């Protein structure tokens, strides 16, 4: 099998202007590595089945599936088989940052979102798009028809950043807007007030939605690869501060590590999937590793 990162590297992606082509290349890469379903809707096999549970009618057991797997599955009703996806992208100004990578955090998010949109449409699952910064912004209602893919990709190519992030308020709006249970995929650097942000994300899960948080940081925001005196600027407020890299580096990296660890712990306790990535990782490889790890938990 050809390694996924050979299909499309971030530096190559910056040279490809057609987002639909980029999405297809990424998806083609990680589909080669999938042999089962990480989500019911992202199915390679048994998409129309679910595990037998006490109380289910034994007459509904699929004995062909049992012969293949040694496990009991029953045929799912049509209403159970569709997975409605919502791509939720952070458009706050901090998402426009890159230090030396070819992709900004927003570019990286768009690549992940485009690939997941392409995959869901291929599996005939409805998918929609919402964006947010201070508040929830324009949205594309979820649909499963083939025309939905170019509609969403067209919107993704037009996105730009502005303002400060208010993730908690935006997700409260999103939770109230969603009428049916679905899969909410959040793409953000999560650089905002931590406690209400975590609460809002967990409330999405408590409302019955499956939630995945792609925590996207720039390589420099994780590793702090600076020397000498460095002027740091907050892209959302414009405030600046000069620091000594030698003095600040260790404390900074410790703070980021602790931040990620707190998020992972909080989200795990609330059954929210947490996927920390930075822009130095090929996004196709990061996505495939996540999908495979989730598949292995089912």
Image: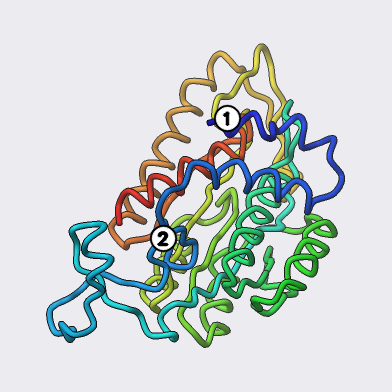
Q: Is residue 262 above or below residue 2?
A: below
Residue at the (51%, 43%) spot, across then down: 288
- How packed is label 1: few (under 14 Cα within 10 Å), some, or many (20 or more)? few
Where does the image place residue 193, in percent across and percent down from the top left?
Answer: 52, 56
How many numbered discs, if any? 2
Residue at the (57%, 63%) spot, across then down: 167
Q: Is residue 246 above or below residue 126?
A: above
Q: Nearer the viewer, residue 298 or 240?
A: 298
Give how far apart the Cα atoms at labels 1 and 2 are.
Answer: 22 Å
- How packed is label 2: few (under 14 Cα within 10 Å), some, or many (20 or more)? few
The answer to the question of whether label 1 and label 2 lie on touching residues, with beta carbons closer than 8 A, is no
Where does the image place residue 215, in percent across and percent down from the top left?
Answer: 53, 47
Where does the image place residue 76, in percent across and percent down from the top left?
Answer: 35, 80
Where does the image place residue 129, in percent across and percent down from the top left?
Answer: 67, 69
Which label sits on residue 2? 1
Q: Is residue 112 above or below residue 12?
A: below
Which label sits on residue 45? 2
- Quadrant of the rendering where the C terminus is positioned: bottom left
* In the image: residue 93, left or right of residue 74: right
């Amino acid at each position: 099998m050809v390694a996924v990162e050979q299909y499309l590297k971030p530096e190559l992606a910056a040279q490809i202007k057609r987002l639909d082509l980029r999405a297809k290349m990424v998806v083609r890469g990680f589909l080669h590595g999938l042999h089962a379903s990480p989500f019911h809707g992202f199915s390679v096999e048994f998409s129309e089945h679910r595990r037998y549970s006490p109380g289910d009618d034994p007459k509904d057991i699929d004995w062909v599936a049992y012969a293949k797997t040694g496990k009991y599955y029953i045929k799912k009703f049509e209403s159970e088989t569709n997975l409605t996806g919502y791509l939720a992208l952070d458009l706050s100004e901090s998402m426009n940052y890159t230090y030396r990578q070819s992709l900004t955090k927003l570019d990286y998010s768009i690549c992940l979102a485009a690939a997941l949109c392409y995959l869901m449409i291929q599996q005939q699952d409805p998918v929609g798009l919402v964006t947010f910064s201070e508040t929830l912004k324009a949205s594309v209602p979820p649909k499963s028809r083939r025309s939905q893919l170019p509609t969403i990709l067209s919107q993704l190519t037009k996105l730009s950043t502005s303002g400060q992030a208010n993730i908690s308020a935006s997700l409260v709006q999103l939770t109230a807007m969603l009428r049916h249970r679905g899969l909410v995929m959040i793409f953000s650097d999560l650089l905002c007030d931590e406690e209400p942000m975590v609460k809002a994300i967990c409330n999405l899960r408590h409302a019955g939605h499956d939630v995945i948080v792609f925590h996207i940081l720039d390589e420099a925001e994780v590793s702090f690869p600076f020397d000498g005196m460095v002027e740091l600027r907050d892209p959302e407020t414009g405030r600046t501060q000069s620091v000594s890299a030698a003095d600040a580096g260790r404390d900074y990296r410790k703070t980021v590590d602790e931040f990620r660890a707190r998020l992972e712990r909080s989200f795990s306790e609330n059954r929210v999937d947490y996927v920390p990535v930075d822009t130095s990782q090929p996004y196709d490889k990061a996505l495939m590793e996540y999908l495979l790890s989730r598949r292995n938990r089912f």
